[in-house]
Image (cartoon, rainbow, N blue to C red):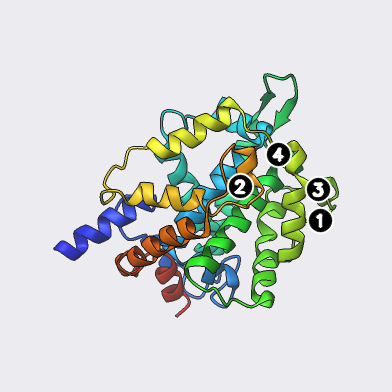
């Protein structure tokens, strides 16, 4: 009983309703977009590192005024940040581990939403969610953050070939959402770690730490913990804040974290990682592996 209660609480933190996601068991043998031998299945399987990476990606995304404007004007995240995070987690799970049909339905759902999201930033610039540069910024900040957290908390020795293969695989997502590569900083979605690093830097002139950005960071820091074990959620937020690229801290008007402070937070996450992984051992990734036999 105690073990199942812990599993349920951790699944809720992960963005679920506390129940095992049985739909990922069907249909047998369907590899979905990536399959069990992919780097995507490997990187996205670890809940603690995905939490740190996902929160860090939100912090980076909040620095792009037009990307943030679409969420600011067309979603309820200011009243229901937890719901927003849960929907994002669901999309990542469905496209990473779902069957081919489930992944395509998730992509079609997001494409339809993006078609409706357009408007004007207070500075007068127009935006639309299906703008290739904005699509790519969201994708790039997520993939970079997920992989960085995976290397910090799961596989520090991950070889360059594996890191490059992750970016190569994940390029399918923005392409499926309608991203036109010719409109991007280097006219191509990153398919290597080196290009991803260069593309992140290419966006720096478009970024700004505004009052809206500050609001998002404050919201993450004060988000109600729901059924999360005490302090766990804020530990993830602090770890994410300390794993951002070094160039982000002057923009956030913060000192670059000291190696000692970073290592202290990493050690705390590592201590918590094992019971969290145990609690989610029958989650989405495990069900997808069972679907593949």
Judge depth for marks 4 and 3 and give the one in front. Answer: 3
Q: Is residue 211 left or right of residue 6?
A: right
Could you tell which of marks 1 and 2 lies nearer the N-terminus? 2
Q: CA distance from mark 2 to mark 4?
A: 13 Å
The nearer-to-camera label among 1 and 2 is 1
Q: Earlier in the sequence, mark 2 or mark 3?
A: 2
Residue at (53%, 61%) from the top-left corner? 149
Q: CA distance from mark 2 to mark 3?
A: 22 Å
The x, y position of residue 269, in whole percent, is 39, 61
Residue 130, numbered circle = 4
Give the residue drawn at x 72%, y 54%: 175
Q: Which residue is depicted at the point 64% across and 38% down?
A: 251
| Towards the viewer: 68 or 131 | 68
Q: Quadrant of the C terminus?
A: bottom left
Question: Which comes before the other along the chain, label 2 or label 4?
Answer: 2
- Image mark count: 4
Confirm or deny contact between disc 1 and disc 3 (CB under 8 A): yes
Q: Is residue 50 visible?
A: no
Judge whether 115 appears above or below 52 on screen: above
| Most foreground residue, 22 or 1 | 1
Q: Nearer the viewer, mark 2 or mark 4?
A: 4
> Which residue is identified by label 1?
188
The residue identified by callout 2 is: 108
* Mark 4 surroundings within 10 Å by alpha-carbon count, few (fewer than 14), some (14 through 19), many (20 or more): many
- What's the CA distance linking mark 1 and mark 3? 6 Å
Q: Is disc 2 in contact with disc 3, using a CB cutoff of under 8 Å?
A: no
């Amino acid at each position: 009983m105690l073990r199942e209660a812990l599993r349920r609480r951790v699944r809720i933190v992960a963005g679920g309703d506390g129940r095992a996601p049985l739909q990922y068991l069907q249909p047998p043998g369907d590899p979905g977009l990536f399959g069990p031998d992919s780097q995507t299945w490997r990187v996205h399987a670890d809940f603690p590192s995905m939490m740190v990476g996902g929160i860090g990606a939100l912090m980076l995304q909040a620095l792009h005024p037009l990307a943030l404007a679409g969420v600011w004007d067309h979603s309820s995240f200011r009243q229901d940040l937890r719901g927003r995070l849960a929907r994002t987690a669901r999309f990542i799970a469905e496209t990473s581990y779902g069957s081919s049909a489930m992944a395509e339905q998730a992509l079609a759902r997001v494409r339809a939403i993006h078609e409706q999201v357009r408007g004007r930033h207070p500075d007068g610039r127009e935006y639309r969610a299906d703008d290739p540069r904005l699509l790519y910024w969201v994708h790039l900040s997520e993939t970079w953050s997920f992989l960085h957290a995976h290397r910090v908390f799961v596989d520090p020795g991950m070889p360059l070939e594996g890191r490059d293969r992750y970016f190569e695989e994940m390029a399918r997502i923005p392409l499926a959402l309608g991203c036109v590569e010719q409109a991007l900083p280097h006219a191509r979605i990153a398919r290597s770690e080196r290009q991803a690093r260069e593309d992140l830097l290419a966006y720096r002139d478009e970024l700004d730490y505004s009052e809206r950005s500050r609001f998002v960071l404050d919201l993450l820091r004060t988000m109600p913990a729901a059924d999360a074990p005490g302090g766990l959620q804020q530990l993830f937020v602090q770890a994410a804040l300390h794993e951002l690229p070094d160039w982000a801290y002057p923009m956030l008007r913060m000192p670059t974290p000291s190696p000692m402070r970073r290592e202290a937070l990493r050690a705390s996450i590592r201590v918590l990682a094992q019971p969290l992984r145990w609690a989610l051992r029958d989650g989405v990734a495990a069900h997808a592996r069972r679907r593949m036999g």
